Image: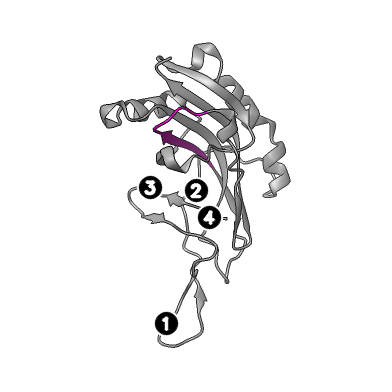
Amino acid sequence: MKLSSIILSAATAVIIGFTASQPTTAHIADKEPIGLCIPLPEGHAPTPGPPTTHAFVTFPKYSELAINAAKPDNVPKNYQAQFYNASGATLYPSAYIIHFEMTSYNATECAEACNAVANEACRGFNTYIERAPTKVPGPACPNPDPTYRFVCALYSDVLGLKNTDNEGGLVEGFEVLERGSNGYIRGL
């Protein structure tokens, strides 16, 4: 499973193209490889209790946030909710523009980012909650503690429920998951 990118705060770094099949170790002067275990920023989404995948997929607060964001009064102006509270994030590589972390489940913030893309190239966006690692997984920390992030992903084409088949995957021993996924299209 490819974790296409982990976007960190501007003060830290951006790790692009990290995959479970790529090396996750560093060699120091012909010594044995060491696990990277680079700390990653904490997310802003509520913690579902125990740090298990089961707790993440059954936490009712995530569904509440997604359903509330898709109510007509909460849908951003000039957008239409195409799907809400899906179990996976949008996987549409040919239309992907960028994604970033938000401090709250905020469709308006995501819509503003979509509107700011030049030449109206952004046609839709996906908001979701992601279970992500607190450290870059590697041999020394194959299954680090999780953190929970609100994510906005922008796309250059119309999104539909059929595109929500990115339910995460394993990175080393850590299981990345997405849920509470809402999709919005522009200008309808």
Quadrant that contains the C terminus: top left
Q: Position of residue 118 (x, y in %)?
A: 26, 31
Q: Residue at x 45, y 51 (%)?
A: 6
In this figure, which residue is indicated by the disc labeled 4?
2
Mark 2: give few (<14), some (14-19) or many (20+) Cα within 10 Å: some
Relative horizontal placement of residue 185, taking residue 175 as reference (left or right): left
State if disc 2 and disc 4 touch (CB < 8 Å): no
Spatial CA distance of label 1 from label 3 is: 28 Å
Work out whether mark 2 precedes mark 3 in sequence or the reverse, and give the earlier one. 3
Mark in front: 4 vs 1: 4
Q: Residue at x 44, y 80 (%)?
A: 27
Gap in angstroms between the C-alphas marked 2 and 3: 10 Å
The answer to which quarter of the image holds residue 1 is: bottom right
In the rendered structure, find residue 9 and report the number of the disc placed on it: 3
On residue 28, the disc is 1
Q: Residue at x 47, y 87 (%)?
A: 31
- Residue 137, image x and y in percent? 55, 62
Kind of residue sitting beneath label 4: Lys
Evaluate whether residue 100 shows in this view. Answer: no
Q: Which mark is residue 42?
A: 2
For label 3, the SS is loop
